[in-house]
Amino acid sequence: MTEEVLELLGEVCPIPLLKTESEINTLTAGDRLIIKVDHTQAVRNIMDWCEDNGYEFNIDEVAPGIWKVEIIKL
Amino acid sequence: MLKKEKQLKWFVIILLISLGFGLLLLYLSLDLSILWFIGLMIGFILQRANFCFAGGFLNFFLFRNTKLIRAIIILIGISTIGFAIYQYLTFNSWNQVLGQVLPWGLYTIVGGFIFGLGMSLAGGCACSSLMRVGEGTIIFVIVIFGFIIGNSIAIVHLEWWIDKFTVATIFIPKYLGWVRAVLLQVIVLSLLYNFFSWFEKRGN
């Protein structure tokens, strides 16, 4: 079980989801990916994408406009 | 870093200023004041709904997700009906229909392609860029400036393209009648909607 952190502050669509997708592919099941992002649309996209793929995720707004998304790979 | 309580405080302050400005506009003209409030409401709804034209297309082409693009189709459907009613009620002659009835030619397609490229690279079209500026994303201030520069340059030589390459100016209700034109557009849109629904289901 490893934990990867992806810093995506300042990145806009579609970069955050593209990077999330390629990062998830390098992980093995049970690994955790933590993403920091400040683009609202990107948070929504990552949520939708996780739901479509059946990944468990957790979202926390650490400061106004900055979100920490935690994804557990299946 | 900004605290959440501070965010709420600033929201209330800016809301009061906006309302005050809207009331001030009433002294100047009722129309301006109404436009101001409609603008505020549209901005608020767009932000809360996370609506984004660029995102709709990007999500479809890059991630095979059709949720936003279907929302865009519904939006066009609703505005088709709304606009048709408005144009019908204010109708005088076919030469002065309310709204922009513009000619098309090859330049429409080329322009659309360039706009699409720019929109995808910048991460937002006009409405979502404005919304992101409102959210406080500095990058989109640059996008808005790019927009203004691009539009200003385009306006200078637009006439020349229209003169040389226009195929025709077509306003469908003129040829089919109002009801049939609206029906045609709604049918085409619902076909598109069904196509995207089917595409989404097939992917899963």
Image: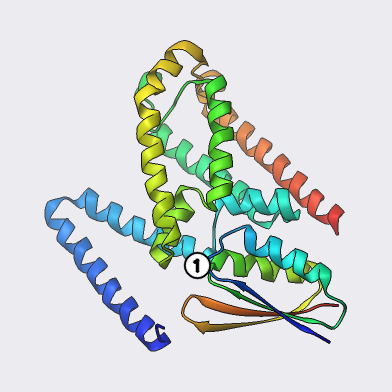
Q: Which residue lies furthest to the left in this view?
A: B27
Q: What element carries label 1?
A: helix
Task: In the rendered view, tell whether residue B122 sits above or below residue B132.
Answer: above
Color style of the picture = rainbow
- Quadrant containing the N terminus of chain A is bottom right
- Say which quarter of the image contains residue B102: top left
Q: Position of residue B14 (x, y in %)?
A: 28, 72
Q: Could you tell me how many numbered marks the image carries?
A: 1
Residue pointed to by mark 1 = B48
Residue B137 at x, y = what percent?
A: 44, 64
- Point 55% across, 35% down: residue: B114
Q: Judge whether B99 appears above or below A59 on screen.
A: above
Q: Which residue is drawn at 52% across and 66% down?
A: A10
- Which of A22/B80 is in front? A22
Q: What's the residue type where badge 1 is placed? A: Arg
Residue situated in front as seen by the camera: A32 or B13: A32
* Residue A55 visible in this rendered orientation of the protein: yes
Q: In this view, does B9 lie above or below B185?
A: below
Q: Which one is nearer the viewer's eye here, B105 or B192?
A: B105
Q: Dot 1 surroundings within 10 Å: few (below 14), some, or many (20 or more)?
A: few
